[in-house]
Amino acid sequence: MLDLTSVGIVIPKSVHFDKPLHLKSGAVLDSYDLMYETYGELNETKSNSVLICHALSSNHHVAGYYADDPKSIGWWDNMIGPGKPIDTRKFFVVGVNNLGGCHGSTGPASINAKTGKLYGAGFPMVTVQDWVAAQVQLANHLGIKQFAAIAGGSLGGMQALQWTLDFPDRVQHALVIAAASKLTAQNIAFNDVARQAIITDPDFYGGDYCSHDAVPRRGLRLARMLGHITYLSDHSMAEKFGRELRNGPLGFGFDVEFEIESYLRYQGDKFADQFDANTYLLMTKALDYFDPAHDSKGDLREAFSAAQADFLVLSFTTDWRFSPERSRAIVKALLDNELNVSYAEITSSYGHDSFLMEDRYYHELVRAYMNNIII
């Protein structure tokens, strides 16, 4: 049956930039490509655009599906489309794969034009600020001077925040969902354990595994399994898997016995087949580095003093990775700057992954906010 709320078949696009991009690390990318997708129509005044920023392991494929792979549904398809909370009958929506990614944008698995070889471990470190700077170039390419809204969950929400600080006059509204102004020590620790799983894999070869015709699959697999545990809540794992055994009686060994073990190994194997290890290292480090209040000695109010946008900040009760407390700190800093802020703490059993789920109350909040945006 035809889904009238889907944007339907989508075609990814690539744009090349020759203008050098100066990164926060001091490195310079002389040229780079960005992969992106668009949904809906840009209006005559180009005032109806919405930028979607992706989280750690996502990409530009936000909504719809590909003609040659109908099962390739966009990662936020339940949020974006005709009649959905971010309604493509009203808005022109842009999804982009960040620099350092492994889904078409220039990253470690790309060819370095200077050497004619893969970047590999030589790809420079990137930050949230660098991603925003590159996204600005994409906006310029599309002729968009100001976004009606910039939205994202988790690391995507951090990018939305950074936009309001670095380019305050180019953002009307920011939707910051399941995010934080910086990582806790515990979160940094989780990321480092995941990176160590990859780096210590014998097939990593210092990041130059491609030249050895190898893939650090075991490390990637473990990194994803660890990460996936932190994205879920204890309640959601108990509800979905409990202590169910996969094949009946106890096996008294180390093979898969519990359903949760089977699920995590499946997710790890799937991820290791699809994602680049160097990209994973870069993305998690960018997450660690994000801290807009660093230069103001931790003063969030001062850090957000440049912002001009209106904000919708959403958190989820069982998200222990980016707890509601972290969102409330953002809200306070924005209110201290006398900005317009709407905040909701949503009851959900899905943990950090709640921002990806189709929850009626959550979606109605986003819909109501987006409906009130004047374009």
Image: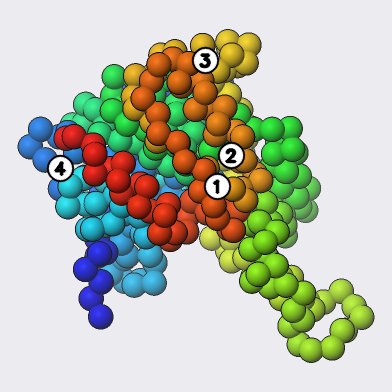
The quadrant the N terminus occupies is: bottom left
Q: Name the residue under label 4.
A: 42
Q: Which of 4 and 331 is in front in this view?
A: 331
Q: Where is residue 46 in the image (x, y as percent from the top left)?
A: 15, 34
Element on which disc 1 rests: strand
**Residue found 36% across the figure and 43% down from its top:** 52
Q: Upstream in the sequence, badge 4 or badge 3?
A: 4
Task: Reply above or below: 243 against 38.
Answer: below
Amino acid carrying mark 2 in the image: Pro
Position of 147 with respect to 275 (left or right) is left
Query: Secondary structure beneath disc 4?
Result: loop
Q: Distance between the residues labelled 4 and 2?
A: 35 Å
Residue at the image point whose x is 24% and y is 39% from the top: 372
On the image, numbered disc 1 is attached to which residue? 316
Which mark, by number, is residue 324? 2
Tell me the mark number nearer the camera, choosing from 4 and 1.
1
Extreme residue toward the bottom, this view: 248
Mark 3 secondary-structure assignment: helix
Residue at point 42% right, 54% down? Answer: 361
**Which type of secondary structure does the marked residue at label 2 adopt?**
helix
Quickly name the residue at label 3: 301
